[in-house]
Amino acid sequence: MANIILRGCNGKMGQVITEMVEADKDAIIVAGVDIAQNNIQRYPVYQNFAHCNVKADVIIDFSSPIGIEEMLDYAVDRGIAIVLCTTGFSKEQLVLIEEASKHIPILKSANMSMGVNLILKLVQEAAKVLTEAGFDIEIVEKHHNKKVDAPSGTALAIADAINEVLNNEYQYKYDRSQERVPRNSKEIGISAVRGGTIVGEHEVIFAGTDEVIEIKHTAYSKAIFAKGAIQAAKYLPNNEPGMYQMSDVIG
């Protein structure tokens, strides 16, 4: 049984996770941490970790980078694993996360979907073959109009996965409006679309001479991210300190 503290429990994703955990016989939410104190949950909710004195195995964080330092200190002090689903960290915060992983297991993923994590493997295989044949690479991501960061953490994760198998020789291009030059063959274009209630869509385009190959993932609800986070929360506590990915969970 995984005893979970849910950070961001009163947000939209927090509510989805809460509902799904209630139907999971192998997990339970023992407490929540959220600055919004609207008392909608059936478990105790604290405004910060300083007031949370509940025994737990793992923290699921679906909030924001704000306050990450407090959570890391809390988890390290108590030996609690962290499933880190938040994106938009600063370089300084990433260093703190890496340092904390020397003491506790931390799973950090820009996208908890099993489908997206399969996509990461597929695009690597495609990139190794297609770039040798002169194909260009473009990534287009689409999200709802309330999303504040761009490009998405998932789009960057896809780009990083591709670049990893290409010896990190490619540069990322986010904007072409300021230059009037031909496309560089050693670049990955990343475009962001924001509109309506789009949950999440990521398309990787491999464009060659007279042919185009597209690998695409579409999320129709937030439930797919909640399911992945819960799976990770059940997997992580029994592991040694270190950094983990969703690929470790799905095998």
Image: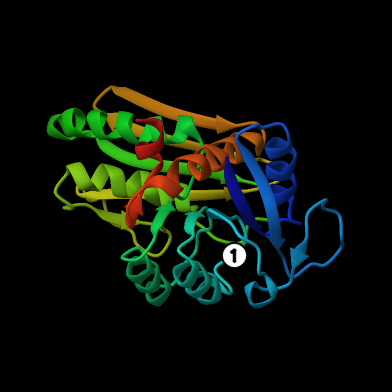
Q: Is residue 50 left or right of residue 209?
A: right
Residue under the point 32% across and 52% down: 240
Q: Quadrant of residue 142?
A: top right
Asked whether 117 or 33 is in front, the reply is 33
How many marks overall? 1
Residue highlighted by disc 1? 64
Residue that lies at the very extreme toward the right in this rendered image? 39
Residue 78: % across, % down: 49, 67
Look at the image and tell me whether residue 145 can be seen.
Answer: no
Residue 134: % across, % down: 17, 34
Residue type, mark 1 in image: Ser
When the figure is inspected, residue 117 is found, relative to residue 39, above or below; the finding is above
Q: Is residue 181 left or right of residue 133?
A: right
Q: Is residue 141 left or right of residue 222?
A: left
Q: Is residue 227 left or right of residue 121?
A: right
Residue that lies at the very extreme toward the top in this rendered image? 211
